[in-house]
Amino acid sequence: MSYDDRTAKTRRLAGGLILSAMACMWSGTAAAQGGPGYEPSYRQKLRAESCGKTETAEGPYCIKRCDPDFKLEMRATKPFCRATSGSAQRKPVAVEYQPPVAQSNAKPVAGY
């Protein structure tokens, strides 16, 4: 085998490895972006705190539990709730806001 044959084989092998690595990265990115699921809310707990009843402790974070039919996946950057079935639906978040009650005996604030 001559030197030119070896370098050509090495280049083809390196090119094939690069293309397969790019395909793996692209498919992982596409699955992460288009996959059924959502990012749960999370917070960093302080030293004296513990997680609430609806939260899961994962390292220094308290992560909201996933809805039914979703499974928590810990990723390198953020947690993710992945759907376990094709018909998994996320419950809409109910807003519990009530407008303040007008007070009839309220005094005006000076300067307004």
Image (cartoon, rainbow, N blue to C red):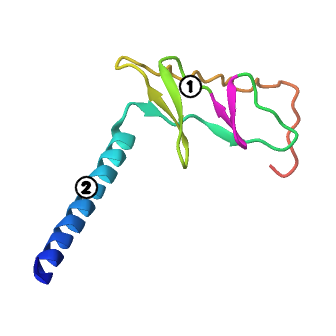
Residue 54 in the image: x percent, y percent? 69, 23
Secondary structure category for the residue under label 1: loop
Q: Residue at x 64, y 38 (%)?
A: 42
Residue 79 relative to residue 12: left or right: right
> Which residue has dot 2 on it?
20
Amino acid type at circle 2 is Ser
The part of the image, by quadrant, that contains residue 51 is top right
The part of the image, by quadrant, that contains residue 11 is bottom left
Instruction: Judge whether 87 appears above or below 19 on screen.
Output: above
Could you say which is closer to the camera, residue 94 or residue 13?
13
The crowd level at tag 2 (other Cα within 10 Å; few <14, some 14-19, many 20+) is few
Q: Is residue 55 magenta?
A: yes
The part of the image, by quadrant, that contains residue 34 is top left
Amino acid type at circle 1 is Cys
Instruction: Judge whether 77 appears above or below 34 on screen.
Output: below
Q: Residue at x 86, y 44 (%)?
A: 109
Q: Nearer the viewer, mark 2 or mark 1?
A: 2
Q: Is residue 89 magenta?
A: no
Question: What residue span does the magenta drawing correspond to?
Answer: 54-64
Q: Residue at x 50, y 19 (%)?
A: 91
